Amino acid sequence: MSPTAPAADQDLLRALAPQVLAALLRRHAGAFDACEDAVQEALLAAAEQWPREGRPANPRGWLVTVAARRLVDLVRADRARREREERLFLATPQSELLGRPADAGPDADRDDSLALLFLCCHPALTAPSRIALTLRAVGGLSTAQIAAAFLVPEATMAQRISRAKQTIRSSGLPFALPAPAEADGRLREVLQVLYLVFNEGYTSTAGGGLTAPRLSDEAIRLTRLLHRLLPQDAEVMGLLALMLLTDARRPARTGPNGELVPLAEQDRTRWDTAAIAEGTALVERALPAGRVGPYQLQAAIAALHDEAPDVAATDWPQILALYDLLLRVAPGPVPALNRAVALAEVRGPAAALAELDALSTELDRHHRYHAVRAELLSRTGDTPAATTAFHRAAALAPTLPERRYLTDRAHTPPR
């Protein structure tokens, strides 16, 4: 996509890209690579022509038509891939190749973005492959951008995406929405992928920076797309709310030199009030809408943090109650660790330390476990043990700002 295209056109093209790819894949599911190449050429043509000739009355139809023609051109010209050409031509009536454009049929206005999301997050793919393919095919990020965000070589990311496409081709995965019996489980896969992308952007798992905003922004954009496609799904609402309420604090999470600022010390006037208002409204809609799920509960917890004017005014008893419910809905060591933090605020650090002891085996390699334990030990006055725990947390921390913060805490007096 040309960077010289007006911002409004760039935003529209980015939003339409997965719809156009889905329209092509609906008819040529076995030609993922060729369809993606055709869509990219159509987007480039639009970015070059629209500013000069004006935006067409039906931008999506224009893109689908151009992409469909480019697909035919690509297949005809690619003599080195004759087998793919024969498969595509055999699967497509000649009248369609020569005549009717891809957006001229009765399904022309159908948005298959949801089917594309389900395909990219198919359980036959590994978790890293789902993330990479979703960002590439649905998000429109280049291979280089995805590789840079995850701090891996571009060649490694290209292989990952290529393997994911090969899995789709060889397994015959259908380009269609899942059957009702498996829809809930498949939707959970999609939500998990989007949540993992957001978390990687909000707190990077490696590198010199604490956050990778491009990833968290993309996760929010894709979750908005999913919410548009499934507007009544309470867990989709909950995930979008959780992202917005969490990301609202991002401006205050780092200091002027990129240093980590913990929640209790953040300048809350820097939080994004519009995102908090939108996220809170989504929580209020989601909770009464159906069965309560883990994303809704986490969003409700985030809302209580964001609504408090300072850490002392936080409704810790309510947060503790929500964590108790979350552990019944989705038990796991990380929610239990977060519950221990709330428990310390309600019943004191000694009670929370007793809870942490039960998590030591599962979370011993998790830096946040040792960081929480160090803070609680510091509050009990056990400075030597707290110092040891801070050093252990620093050694395990994945990013430089976290390592620096935890190392500094190991050498500062108890708070």
Image (cartoon, rainbow, N blue to C red):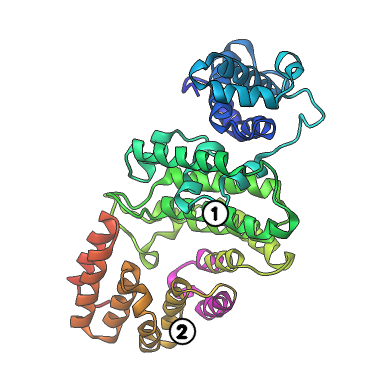
Label 1 or label 2, whichever comes before in sequence order: 1
Q: Which residue is drawn at 56% across and 54% down?
A: 123
Which span of residues is magenta-colored? 303-328
> As rendered, which of 218 and 414 lies closer to the eye?
218
Is 278 in the magenta?
Answer: no
Residue type at tag 1 = Leu
Whole-percent x, y for residue 413 in the image: 20, 75
Q: Can residue 273 be seen in this view?
A: no
The disc placed on residue 346 is 2
**Tag of residue 244:** 1
Residue 316 lies in magenta, yes or no?
A: yes
**Quarter in which the C terminus is drawn:** bottom left
Up-down relation of residue 29 to residue 47 (above or below) = below
| Dot 2 amino acid type | Val
Rounded to the nearest angstrom, the CA distance separating label 1 from label 2 is: 27 Å
Q: Which of 346 and 230 is in front in this view?
A: 230
